[in-house]
Image: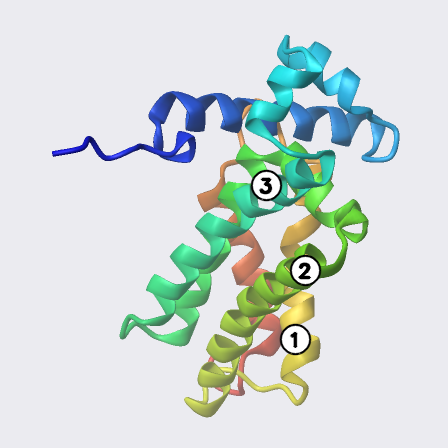
Amino acid sequence: MPRKRTSKLQTDGFAARRAEIVDIAAHLFAENGYAGTGIAQIGDAVKLARGALYYYIDSKETLLNEIHDRVMDPLLATAEQVVATNASAEVRLRLVSEELLTQIIERREHVWVFLHEYRALRDERLAHFRKRRRKFEDFISQLLDEGRKDGAFEFEDVRLVTLSFLNLHNYTYQWVDVEGRLGARELSALYCSIFFHGIAAPGEE
């Protein structure tokens, strides 16, 4: 019986090396900007010649796409699981908040690239990025709307409140304590306390 061929994408060694390249590219993009970082510079940083580098990635844009997915994959997976539970909207928003801050703290450079360089993506990749980002935003909107319908929250514009919730979190990477004295759980508790107090319905504070 012929042996089944294994794609390079399915091998642990290839995946680990590719992830390392993505992380190093995130550092370079955050430090020099996407446009200011050349493929040769990435190759030098990962100690691979151009031909060997292209074994792992087919373009600089591929790296940018992968950096975005390194942030979005865990966010979407966790948010989907959390939204499906029977906990209150407030509890589920706290859990999503903590996961978002976990990604922001653990992948500060990826998040910088995520927020500042996504416009360099083109065509299908840009559409893919926007679709995934909107899907995460929709999870937040869904939970906020559920809280409003349950009488826990009071506000008029769910889209505006969703963006306010995200803005409260997203730029944490600019100042967060890199030594870890402020963790995702502590920051999430603070942010959610501030945010939920602001949109609490009368009698819910």
Q: In the picture shown, does residue 146 fall above or below 106?
A: below
Q: Do we see residue 95 in this rendering?
A: no
Q: Secondary structure beneath disc 3?
A: helix
Q: Which residue is mark 2?
A: 124
Q: In the picture shown, does residue 178 fall above or below 99?
A: above
Tell me how far mark 3 sits from mark 1, CA to CA: 29 Å
Q: Which residue is mark 3?
A: 66
Q: Residue at x 43, y 24 (%)?
A: 14
Q: Secondary structure beneath disc 2?
A: helix
Q: Which residue is mark 1?
A: 161
Is 5 or 101 nearer to us in this picture? 5
The image quadrant that residue 52 belongs to is: top right
The image quadrant that residue 32 belongs to is: top right
Which residue appears farthest toward the front when viewing the image?
1
Q: Do we see residue 158 in this rendering?
A: yes
Mark in the foreground, 1 or 2? 2
Tell me how far mark 3 sits from mark 2, CA to CA: 14 Å
Q: Position of residue 128 (x, y in %)?
A: 62, 60
Amino acid beneath label 1: Val
For marks 1 and 2 on the same chain, the one whose residue lies earlier in the sequence: 2
Q: Residue at x 81, y 35 (%)?
A: 34
